[in-house]
Image (spheres, rainbow, N blue to C red):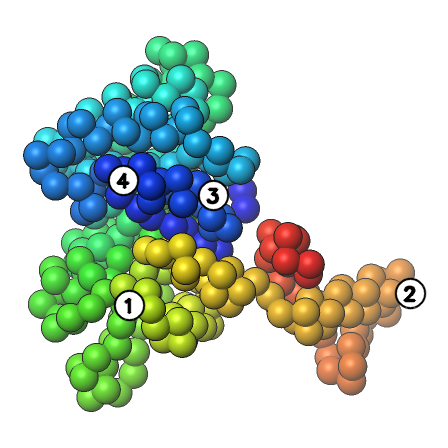
Amino acid sequence: MIAPRSVLICPATSAKMAAKAAASAADLAVLDLEDAVAPSEKPGARALVVEGFRSLDWQGRPPAWRVNAAATMWCHRDLIEVVEGAGGRAGMVVLPKAETAGQVAFVDILLTQLEAALGLAERIGLHVQIESARGLANVREIALASPRIEALVWGPGDFAATAGMPHAVIGVPDEHDAVYPGHRFGYAMHEVLVAARLAGVAAIDGPYADFRDLDGLRRSCAIARALGYDGKWCIHPGQVETVNEVFSPAAAEVETARGIMAAYAAATAAGTGAVVHDGVMVDAASIRMAEATLARAGRSGDRGL
């Protein structure tokens, strides 16, 4: 499983936006049936997801869609109609507002039944969004609730609403961040990250809603990357390049990692216990970090790293 750096979401009801998303450089593009679609349009939008999966060039990526939350009246039909209609093309589903392991298990069981009934050879993947206080409290159980989970996604906007935190624009710092001595979402983001690593899946940061502010987006990406996140959601194609860049290791990082691994290999071949690279002692943790950097570089191979 290769963790996506950029996840671009767009309304399922806009054929123009769907085409742009599919043609973008995002590592994953998602057609949205949830927040971007009005309640009266949700049933009809499922057919538009199916049409997008069948007609668009997804550039080798799994065609993905976001269903409505498991607690709503739309979720089961969002799964059934898209999977049955897509003819084996549905590759990834995003479950928003997950609050219990049972909700994830419901989606897993229904997808398993659909795959069996349709004779699908490839298992549909699952990204799970943590967007509420209850979801955060249960995040570790949620992360382990299904083997088809490939990523946990942190959702700051809905979380702020459930936690009673003042937050005007999703992902964008405001006057409340200025007075708080630290990162207001730091604890929650760490919890999601730890749960993801416990389950062996990716951790994806939520969106930065001011899509014209690329400097702010870059800072937001850098914070998430510093915490250990693998990628970030995008709400506009213009954000993808910045997100891909920040979540790809720099050439200097890759060179250092390769040097560490080479020094380790040489020391192992020589039977020496001490490993030194550029005058710095290298331990087991250094090796693991170097391996992680090279794994990310392999993911970002299209960027010449």
Q: Residue at x 20, y 61 (%)?
A: 157
Which residue is located at x 24 percent, y 28 percent?
A: 46
Q: Earlier in the sequence, mark 1 or mark 3?
A: 3
Residue of label 2: 270
- Residue under label 4, please give it: 14
**Of callouts 4 and 1, which one flags the residue occurring earlier in the amino acid sequence?**
4
Q: CA distance from mark 4 to mark 2?
A: 61 Å
Which quarter of the rendering shows the C terminus? bottom right
Crowdedness near tag 2: few (<14), some (14–19) or many (≥20) residues, C-alpha within 10 Å = few
Q: Is residue 5 left or right of residue 86?
A: right
Q: Is residue 121 visible?
A: yes
Residue 227: image location, x then y, percent: 43, 69
Circle 3 residue: 23
- Amino acid tagged 2: Ala
Q: Nearer the viewer, mark 4 or mark 2?
A: 4
Q: Closer to the camera, 218 or 142? A: 218
- Give the residue drawn at x 33%, y 44%: 17
First in residue order: circle 3 vs circle 2: 3
**With respect to residue 155, does 250 lie above or below?**
below
Q: Is residue 66 left or right of residue 244?
A: left
Disc 4 vs disc 2: Cβ atoms closer than 8 Å?
A: no
Instruction: Please give the residue where the numbered disc 1 appears in the rendered image.
Output: 210
Q: Secondary structure at mark 3?
A: helix
